[in-house]
Image (cartoon, rainbow, N blue to C red):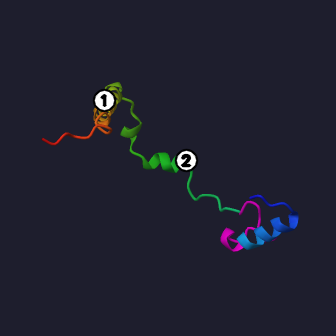
Amino acid sequence: YNVDSDKDRQYMLQELNPFADGIMNKRRPANPPLAPPTFTLKTIKDAIPEHCFKRSLAKSVGFLLTDFVKIAIFGYLATFISNPVAIN
């Protein structure tokens, strides 16, 4: 910020303090305390249906091929970006 002296730095910090949500407040903790979550990883996993955890090679390959087709289509369409369409 090209501040030469400590006095200028303190002045700049005081001017920016209203926009920094009271960051210069000495009583403000460095890391505000957070309440522990009311859930565990087990409760999250239990909320997800079991069929979501079953692996399927056929589905995975299908998704992979679908992604490659999308990449090819968008790659082909991207070649037309710099070339204006000729109007006859």
Residue displayed at 55% across by 55% down: 39
- Say if 6 sits above or below 68 in the image: below
User: Looking at the image, which is closer to me, 39 or 67?
Assistant: 67
> If the image is split into quadrants, where does the C terminus sit?
top left
- Three-letter amino acid code at the position of disc 1: Ala
Q: Quick one: SS at disc 1?
A: helix
Q: 7 and 36: which one is in front?
A: 7
Magenta stretch holds residue 36:
no
Quadrant of res 16 = bottom right
SS at badge 2: helix
- Please name the predominant secondary structure of the magenta segment in the image: loop
First to last magenta residue range = 17-32
Instruction: Classify 10 Å Cα crowding around label 1: few (below 14), some (14-19), many (20 and above).
Output: few
Which residue lies most toward the left here? 88
Give the image quarter of residue 34: bottom right
Mark identifier at residue 41: 2
Q: Are marks 2 and 1 in contact (CB under 8 Å)?
A: no
Q: Earlier in the sequence, mark 2 or mark 1?
A: 2
Residue 72 numbered mark, or none: 1
Q: Nearer the viewer, residue 73 or 79?
A: 79
Dot 2 surroundings within 10 Å: few (below 14), some, or many (20 or more)?
Answer: few
In the displayed structure image, the side of residue 17 where residue 67 appears, left or right: left
**Looking at the image, which residue is at 42% across and 36% down?**
53
Name the kind of residue labelled 2 in the image.
Leu
